[in-house]
Amino acid sequence: MSPMTTNAKTTPPAGPLTVGFDLDLTLLDTRPGIRRTWEAFSEQYGVEVDAEVVIGRLGPPLEREMAHWVPADQVTEMAARYRTLYGIHAFAPTVPMPGARDALDAVREAGGRTVVVSAKNGPHAERHFVHLGIEPDAVVGGLFAEGKAEALRAHGASVYVGDHVGDVRGAAAAGAFSVGVTTGPCDAEELRAAGADVVLEDLTDFRAWWESYVARAAAGETV
């Protein structure tokens, strides 16, 4: 399969560009820290959780995942307890995804801005980037799927990059060009079926695509 597949339909906007990125499994590989946090959660609270199942479907908000493992009336409380443990266990094991730093650099080199929009709570999302020495222009947490459109519109993002069909839906709701990466739970077929305008294998392919996109934008061409 080609590393890049497209649904040609979108005209790139002229002028400065803002690109949005998802966090989990798009920019950062949070799986080791999330696994460690769930294991600590299970040990401390006696809740049986299959951490491998959890990290195989990252993307939706924590409360949605927690609902698979505890009674409905305990979700809010247990999610808060999990977040406390996350702050202890999740940051050190987290690393950038391949190509993540270069993707952010590529946007900035073209005079663009970068905004991270994630379902992860904002303070933890920000702390991940501080820990790794990565500096997006803005970080917004607590939003998933169509809910991400609020932040994308507020920051003027014309492109959104993510690994989940929820990210594709968020881009569509914001009227942004949707770039899917197959580094998360959704494969290329799922991302295209959800409406992704382009699908990359991972962010190591982003720079080449981005430079082409910017060139076409400057020429007023359609992608």
Image (cartoon, grey):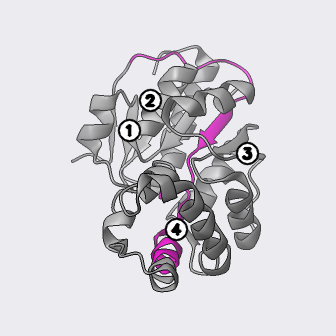
Splitting the image into 4 quarters, where does residue 76 fall?
bottom right
Q: Which residue is mark 3?
A: 108
Q: CA distance from mark 1 to mark 4?
A: 18 Å
- List x then y, in percent, for residue 223: 45, 22
Q: CA distance from mark 4 to mark 3?
A: 24 Å
Which mark sits nearer the N-terminus, 3 or 2? Answer: 3
- Looking at the image, is 89 positioned above or below residue 129? below
Q: Which residue is mark 1?
A: 165
Residue at 59%, 75% in the rendered image: 90
Q: CA distance from mark 2 to mark 4?
A: 22 Å
Q: Which residue is mark 4?
A: 30
Q: Which mark is residue 121?
A: none
Picture mark count: 4
- List x then y, in percent, for residue 57: 35, 56
Q: Is residue 120 part of the magenta span, yes or no?
A: no
Q: Is residue 15 part of the magenta span, yes or no?
A: yes
Determine whether label 2 and label 1 are within 8 Å by CB: yes
Q: CA distance from mark 2 to mark 1?
A: 6 Å
Q: Which residues are magenta?
A: 9-38
Q: Is residue 185 or residue 108 the one in the foreground?
A: 185
Say few, some or many: other residues with alpha carbon within 10 Å of mark 3 (under 14 / 14 to 19 / 20 or more).
some
Identify residue type, mark 1. Answer: Val
Position of 27 compared to 71: left or right? right
Q: Which residue is mark 2?
A: 169
Identify residue type, mark 2. Answer: Arg
Identify residue type, mark 4. Answer: Thr
Residue at 61%, 69% in the rendered image: 81
